[in-house]
Amino acid sequence: MTQAYWNWGLAAWMAMAPVIALVLMRISAPYGRHANAKVGPGLPPRLGWFLMELPALLTFPIVATVASGERPPLLWMLLGLWALHYGNRALIYPLRLRSKTPLPVLILALGVIFNAINGTILGLGLTRFGGVPQVAWLAHPLCWVGLAMFLGGYLLNLHADAVLRRMRRANPTGYAIPREGAFRWVSSPNYLGEMIEWFGFALVTFSLAGLAFAVWTAANLLPRALTHHQWYLRTFPDYPRDRKAVLPFLL
Ligand SMILES: NC(=O)c1ccc[n+]([C@@H]2O[C@H](COP(=O)([O-])OP(=O)(O)OC[C@H]3O[C@@H](n4cnc5c(N)ncnc54)[C@H](OP(=O)(O)O)[C@@H]3O)[C@@H](O)[C@H]2O)c1
């Protein structure tokens, strides 16, 4: 495939993301608090999350190292950032998960496809097409802005996940209003952190493939954050009215 075809393919893939986001505004992905019996059987959440996220942990590194003729030094840094996030999401997060709600097989299957496609696009996009930035990119301030966004978003996501885990442990089946940390400003700081992370990663890679991944992450998480927020407002009459869904003071 030539570079031009690749770029057009990526642009088409990215253009699909807002369409899916609009669909997800109307039909929230049926897992967790939005689960419903109509989507069919599910797996225990720990097993489900492990199986869903494992392809993400593996696909990008495998495709990037196998597809690439050469392995530029910055590729290892990008793979390190990837392993930091997906090592947690695929291995540690499921082990610590306290949810009792089964993960529907349908969601698991869609998640596996989503993760495998995105990992392949990143792997090919950063090596065969476009290329990993040169080491000199490390001296550019934008690279450091991207790294700071990645690490800041990662820590925000970890902290928000930990707050929710503590709440789930204290109350194994019910829901309460989260009040700690960034929950003071938004209903879904876990999703906010994850989006900041991947837009930061896109900046570090300075690539169309990195941007496509960030855009798809937002297409998934923005609608879910809005749905969570509406759910909180409907469920708790005393829910803080000045709290936003996902972007402090804005949305
Ligand atoms: N990159 C992506 O496209 C993508 C997509 C989805 C998720 N993720 C990431 O995966 C992680 C989990 O996502 P999620 O959609 O499962 O998040 P979530 O809906 O916020 O739920 C996270 C966990 O916290 C529990 N929980 C949530 N709100 C609670 C409350 N008010 N009271 C008590 N327990 C509560 C949930 O229990 P229940 O299961 O019982 O509801 C679940 O165990 C997040 O860090 C997210 O960023 C990433």
Image (spheres, helix red, strand yellow):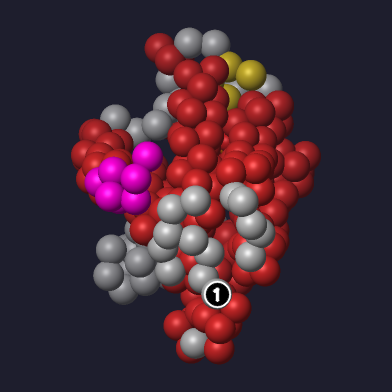
Q: Amino acid at mark 1?
A: Gln
Q: Which residue is drawn at the image coordinates 55% and 89% (left, top)?
A: 139
In the depicted structure, whether residue 216 falls above or below residue 154: above
**Residue placed under numbered mark 1 in the picture:** 134
Query: How far from the left and from the top, in percent, is residue 196?
Result: 46, 66
Query: Which of 80 and 236 lies nearest the eye of the viewer?
Result: 80
Q: Nearer the viewer, residue 120 or 150?
A: 120
Q: Position of residue 71 (x, y in %)?
A: 66, 59
Q: What's drawn in magenta, residue-wise?
A: 1-8
Q: Secondary structure at mark 1?
A: loop
Q: Can residue 118 be seen by looking at this rendering?
A: yes
Q: Tell me which image quadrant ligand 1 sits in.
A: top right
Within 10 Å of disc 1 (Cα), the crowding (few <14, some 14-19, many 20+) is: few
Verify whether residue 98 appears in magenta. no
Quarter of the rendering containing residue 108: top right
Q: Is residue 85 left or right of residue 116?
A: right
Q: Residue at x 48, y 10 (%)?
A: 40
**Residue 63 falls in image quadrant:** top right
> For the point 66% across and 36% down, which residue is it?
54
Q: Main secondary structure of the magenta part?
A: helix
Q: Quadrant of the C terminus?
A: bottom left
| Image point (48%, 88%), residue name | 141
Kindly tell me whether residue 195 is visible in this rendering: no
